[in-house]
Amino acid sequence: MGAEQLLVSDAEVKFERRRRLVGLFGAPLTLLVVLHFAPDNLKPEAARMLALLFATLVLWLTEAIPVPVTAVLAPSVAVLMGIGSAQKMFAAFGNPLLFLFMGAFLLAQAAERTRLDRVLAARLFPTAETSPERTLVSTTLVTAGISSLFSNAATTAMMVPVIRAAVDRFGPRAQAVGILSAAFASSIGGVLTPIGAPANLLAIAALTQYAHKEVPFFKWTLIALPMAAATLAVWLVIVLLTVRLERKRLHTAGRMVVDEPMPTDLLRLRTGDAVLWGLDRGQLATLAVIALAGIGWIAPGALELFGGSQNPGYLWCKAALPEGVVAILSATLLFVLPAATRVVAGVPRPRPVLVWAEAAQIDWGTLLLFAGGVALGEQVFSTGLSNWIGEFVLHATQVKSEWGVVVLISSLSLALSELTSNTATAAMTCPLAVMTAQQLGVSPVAPCVAAALASSMGFLLPISSPPNAIVFGTGKVPLRTMMKNGIWLDVTALLVIPGSVMLMTRLVGLR
């Protein structure tokens, strides 16, 4: 999310203007300074790449121009500076993982258009009267689950009104913490699958491109699950304690809190057109396509895990059904399967689940950022700059083990994610993790995965993530409350990520 979408006060407007001004002047100045003072032991192409890399980081951190524009600008400037040819610099825009992104975005767009996401959310909520505590537990878990498949920003926006109604009779403290659940659960749930957050695919791309290591869909979920579960459990404890203390305070003050059934009407479900299981034709078609894609994504990893890497089924899936191909094949069905009937020139015609005008509304900016980040990373490695950066990081930090690299990179990712886009953070730190690990002679898988997971764990500020910005914009979540509660999740993530990632990468056989 760009900074212009996060502004809620005059002070923030002024701050963003100054930050952009710093970026507009600071980026070219940084480029010139680094070029002039580049280390003598760097090749000319590597020195120019180092200068461009620093200038790009300045633009990403300040958001002087939109982050996706920077991602396209940087490879163009690289061609201008003689770092690489246009064919090499833009080859990353055909990366197979980019099409996994595109297919996942199309599936999410179909779910939103048909309101399948809202229907599934409502079906998972309790229908009987239940306490606000149980309501918040239910909504938090459902939010995390939905966010693992769809946009965390869209998930947050959908769940905020439901959670606000659940805590409406409480005081401001419990309301704020309850509403924060929509944002924090979305961010946590997003790490569970490769398509849950752009940072996840950036990590997979970095490992595939620079270390020739593949991380199947199923194995990513297994690696991320312990960390996500631990962080979510800590948040649920915070929520329950806050709500119960608020209930006790209101009871002492003589105010009664009435438990109400789950307000699923706030999801604005359509009625009257259900055909099966409460779903209409478009929703059924979308659900079937998502299920088909899920089977295609999970099957290879599951076959390898339970049948071995020489399993004929696994070998066939790996060769014929890479994840990007599964995504595109599945998403194409959305333009074929009928969702409803419309009248054109007096003639009834079936309408597909998606038409191109709707498909064109997907997040193209993230696709450009992904490709641009991969393009820069490729040149960092091909120019030999990666070796110099790895040596510099190891010398500056005195890290001497895989564990040390994981702790260092995850801490850096989390710190940066508090101040800038988690996607931009992952685009910076995932290649850095691979460089540092390779220079040390250890496996880059755990450091790179840890970098991606930590980049999604920014909970302190409204600018840390789009979900944070959405709940802060409700006016019900003071900044102090967000920071006071978010720090607990930041600390939990820092404590849990290194150990869980190191353990799970070994258990699933990714070294």
Image (cartoon, rainbow, N blue to C red):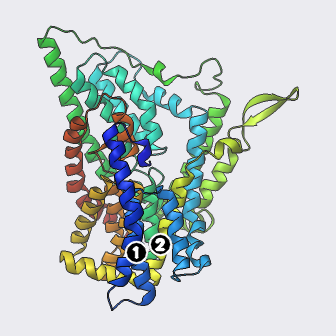
Query: Where, quadrant-wise, is the C terminus in this rendering?
Result: bottom left
Label 2: which residue? 376
- The local crowd at label 1, few if under 14, some if 14 to 19, many if 20 or more residues have their Cα within 10 Å, is many
Figure check: 262 above or below 213: above
Q: Considering the numbered disc 2 on the image, is that residue within a helix, a strand or a loop?
A: helix
Q: Residue furthest right?
A: 346
Quarter of the image for residue 466 reads top left
Which residue shows up at 21% across the image and 39% down it?
485
| Vertical side of 26 occupied by 239: above or below | above
Q: Image point 66% across, 54% down: which residue?
A: 329
Can the viewer see residue 31 in this picture? yes
The residue sitting at 35% across, 66% down in the picture is 429
Q: Identify residue type, mark 1.
A: Leu
Callout 2: few (<14), some (14-19), or many (20+) C-alpha neighbours within 10 Å? many
Image x and y of residue 199, in percent: 42, 57
For the residue pair 305 and 452, the one nearer the viewer reads as 452
Question: Residue flagged by tag 2: what amino acid is it?
Answer: Leu
Say which residue label 1 marks.
31
| Secondary structure state at the residue bearing disc 1 | helix
Camera-nearest label, 1 or 2? 1
In the picture as drawn, the residue positioned furthest to the left comes out as 252
Q: Position of residue 328 (x, y in %)?
A: 64, 55
- Across and down, in percent, residue 231 comes to 26, 46
Q: Picture coordinates of residue 407 (x, y %)?
A: 23, 65
The answer to whether residue 441 is visible is no
Q: What distance separates the C-alpha of mark 1 from that of mark 2?
A: 15 Å
Relative to 230, say whether 85 is above or below: below
